[in-house]
Image (tube, grey):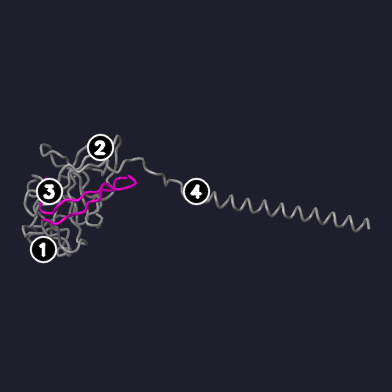
Amino acid sequence: MMVSSSHRGVSEVITTLLILAMTLVGALFLSIIMSDSDLTNVGKTVSDIPPNSIKLTGYDTRDSVNLSNIIQLDNNFDQELCTDSCALYEDNIPLSVSNEGTHFIVLKIKNTYTKPVFIHNVQINNVLHSWDPNTSGKLLETSVDDFTGKYPLGGQFSIIPESDSVQLLQQSTNQLLPDQEVRLVIKLSGDIAPDILVWRPLQIHINFGANQPSEFIILSGDTR
């Protein structure tokens, strides 16, 4: 009887140790999973930039000439902003001697945040327009077709000073300093369909690093 009791006691100890070992392994496995989950969230911080930090202070969406008082920043006068119909040659200027390119619009914006921000992209009627790095540091020139950065290509934009009193040198980056006011020269994407008739609403979303973009609704064929 004593031997049987001894064996039973050893078995109970072994069972207890196995349960403890399984518990430790389970806890370690759960810890690894949680650790991996934390690692995947590194860098996904919540932005503290208010979404209304970018203000729209003016715009020019006319189907006309000299947009925003910029000489030769012209659209073809045909009662619409050409996008889809001009997609095949979207990088050409609107008054191209060969084939009409997509039209331009100009947005005047101001960074009211206390720190620099970057204009990542501008959505127009749900179509993304990105900053064109080829325009960096080049003079804006829209009198003839060009594909070297003298103006933004289709579906992209460049950044120029707010004032006409200075040389219209396109900004070297898409960064806006605190209280800086600039103009975005946007070459409309051929992916916007259909073409935009005048006096139609344009939905504008400006993405600049906040949790939500700055949102505006403006009219085509208008200037403010």
Does the stretch in magenta take in 115? no
Task: Report which residue position mark 4 lands on.
Answer: 39
Disc 4 vs disc 2: which is toward the camera?
2
Numbered tag placed on residue 60 in the rendering: 3
Name the element at disc 4. helix
Q: CA distance from mark 1 to mark 4?
A: 52 Å
- The quadrant where residue 96 appears: bottom left
Numbered tag placed on residue 112 in the rendering: 2
* Label located before the other in sequence (4 or 2): 4
Numbered tag placed on residue 61 in the rendering: none
- Give the position of the C terminus as an image quadrant: top left
* Label located before the other in sequence (3 or 4): 4
Name the element at disc 2. loop
- The quadrant where residue 55 appears: top left
Residue 68 picture location, percent across and down? 10, 45
The 10 Å Cα crowd at callout 3, few under 14, some 14 to 19, many 20 or more, is many
Q: Are marks 1 and 3 in contact (CB under 8 Å)?
A: no
Residue 187 picture location, percent across and down? 17, 54
* Label located before the other in sequence (1 or 4): 4
The 10 Å Cα crowd at callout 1, few under 14, some 14 to 19, many 20 or more, is some
Label 2 is placed on what type of residue?
Thr
Camera-nearest residue between 79 and 148: 79
In magenta, the rendered stretch is 199-224
Label 1 is placed on what type of residue?
Asn
Label 3 is placed on what type of residue?
Asp
Q: CA distance from mark 4 to mark 2?
A: 34 Å
Task: Report which residue position mark 1 lands on.
Answer: 99
Q: CA distance from mark 3 to mark 4?
A: 46 Å
